[in-house]
Image (spheres, coloured by chain):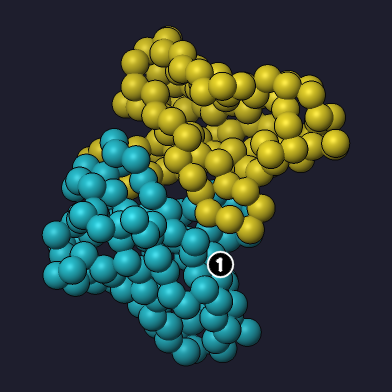
Amino acid sequence: DAGVTQSPTHLIKTRGQHVTLRCSPISGHKSVSWYQQVLGQGPQFIFQYYEKEERGRGNFPDRFSARQFPNYSSELNVNALLLGDSALYLCASSLNQYGFTDTQYFGPGTRLTVL
Amino acid sequence: GQQVMQIPQYQHVQEGEDFTTYCNSSTTLSNIQWYKQRPGGHPVFLIQLVKSGEVKKQKRLTFQFGEAKKNSSLHITATQTTDVGTYFCADPIQGAQKLVFGQGTRLTINP
């Protein structure tokens, strides 16, 4: 079975632009979470979605938004990009809503560079 | 806000030496998870500890959860070059539906 997939793998944008990152969870997993990992730090929680509804939100500005589709795939959108948004964006899937007591399976991430 | 502190930030050892990383919280944890991230890779789930005083082993890795559920440790016996990477503890915040990661301990090994 395929693991969590993310696209694109790398992305270069300029300040002020917007970006859409995509994630496909493991087949059968209904929960998708997004994290931002700045170089040298631990991942920071952005959103969790379950059954197409937002179930958790981290301390990120409104420029960050996400959604989950009926097939449980997800998109993360970031508007008005800032230099500080440069990071590895990770998607994680798990079986259940209360995904944080389940095993979290992380995708390979999307490396976003903002110039 | 809720956070877990991890020490040390970096650890360099000779191959064959032991390694330990510690995770501490100011509040009682419901449970604690540990992840490993290889250089250039993504976090991979290692284990979850739930019970006070719990000890779990995976080959050369030993995980402990403190009696007060405020600290945890990961100990690697006789490190190998395949152990290189950053080890993170993470606190699952049930009510907020989020996982709070520590800063990680980066392990490098001299072969």
Q: Is residue A83 above or below residue B8?
A: below
Left or right: B38, with B78 as reference point: left
Q: Is residue B19 found left or right of B64 in the rendered image?
A: right
Q: Residue at x 69, y 32 (%)?
A: B8
Farthest front residue?
A: A1
Q: Which chain is painted in yellow?
A: B
> Which image quarter holds the N terminus of chain A?
bottom left
Give coordinates of residue A63: x percent, y percent: 37, 76
Chain letter, disc 1 residue: A
Instruction: Please indicate, yes or no, whether residue B68 appears anywhere in the rendered image.
Output: no
Q: Quadrant of residue B40?
A: bottom right
Estimate the x, y position of residue A61 in percent, counting from the top left. Answer: 38, 69
Q: Is residue A104 above or below residue A111?
A: above
Crowding at label 1, few (<14), some or many (≥20) Cα neighbours within 10 Å?
some
The residue depicted at 84 percent of the width and 29 percent of the height is: B14
* Amino acid type, mark 1: Ala
Q: Classify mark 1: helix, strand or loop.
A: strand
Locate residue A26: give its quadrant.
bottom left
Residue for point 38% across, 49% down: A105
What residue does disc 1 label? Answer: A87
In terms of depth relative to the viewer, which is nearer, B103 or A111? Answer: A111
| Residue occupying the point 70% across, 25% down | B19
* Depicted B110 relative to depicted A83: above or below: above
A105 lies left or right of B22: left
Which chain is in cyan here?
A
Viewer-closest of B54 and B78: B78
* Image quarter of residue B74: top right
Quarter holding the C terminus of chain A? bottom right
Residue A113 makes an appearance in the image: yes
- Placement of B70 over or under B15, stated as above or below: above
> Percent position (x, y) of residue A65?
31, 72
